[in-house]
Image (cartoon, rainbow, N blue to C red):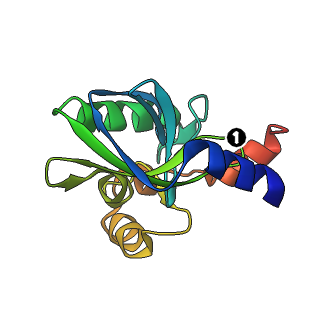
Amino acid sequence: MAIVGAVLQYRLGPARTLIGAARAIDGDSLRLAGEELRLQGLDAPEFRQNCTDRAGRSVDCGRASRRALEALLSQGIVTCEIGKVDRYGRGLAQCRQGETDINATLVREGHAVAYGGYRAEEAQAKAAGRGIWALQFERPETWRRGQGR
């Protein structure tokens, strides 16, 4: 696997920046300048993942997470710094829209969980009961394993 990562890093080149209009794919990935990018340091509910509210009703939390990313991306031009690639060959990105750190905002607002970063933002969202923290949910990684993914 390390060789595959090295080949992909060679193919993508050194750390780089992409700038432009972006489109949400799901709650933690986007398309920018013809490339699919994965937001680094967080994990959002999968598009088909549901959560449960306090009344026991199903909530489309995966779709809500994508809508949250769409709302941030719709504010204007996005700048993404890409340094590494994930196991699927997607660039791992730190993205901003103006002064807004998109990655941190998604976690702080409860639309994603920390996944290698953003622990303080996750704690804030959890303490305030924002987004998925107001619901019963499985962490996306756990949900994917239960789906055979």
Residue 21 placed where, x, y %?
26, 27
Q: Is residue 91 above or below residue 84?
A: above
**Who is closer to the viewer here, 41 or 17?**
17
Using a 10 Å C-alpha cutoff, classify the residue at mark 1 as few (fewer than 14 neighbours), some (14 to 19) or many (20 or more): few
Residue 13 visible in the current orientation: yes
Q: Residue at x 58, y 50 (%)?
A: 137
The residue under the point 19% across, 53% down is 100
Q: Is residue 1 visible?
A: no
Q: Position of residue 90 (x, y in %)?
A: 59, 40
Name the residue that disc number 1 marks: 88
Q: Nearer the viewer, residue 6 or 64?
A: 6
Quadrant in which residue 76 is drawn: top left
What amino acid is labelled 1 in the image? Tyr
Image quadrant in which the C terminus is located: top right
Residue 138 location in percent, x, y?
64, 52
Residue appearing at x 80%, y 60% in the figure: 2
**Does residue 114 lie above or below 58 as drawn?**
below
Would you say 109 lies left or right of 37 here?
left
Horizontal side of residue 69 vs 63, given as left or right: left
In this picture, is 36 found above or below 105? above
Looking at the rendered structure, the secondary structure element under dot 1 is loop
How many numbered circles does the render carry?
A: 1
Where is residue 67 shown, x and y percent of the image? 36, 30
Near-viewer residue (138 or 115): 115
Tell me the quarter of the image containing the N terminus.
bottom right
> Which residue is depicted at the point 35% across and 68% down?
121
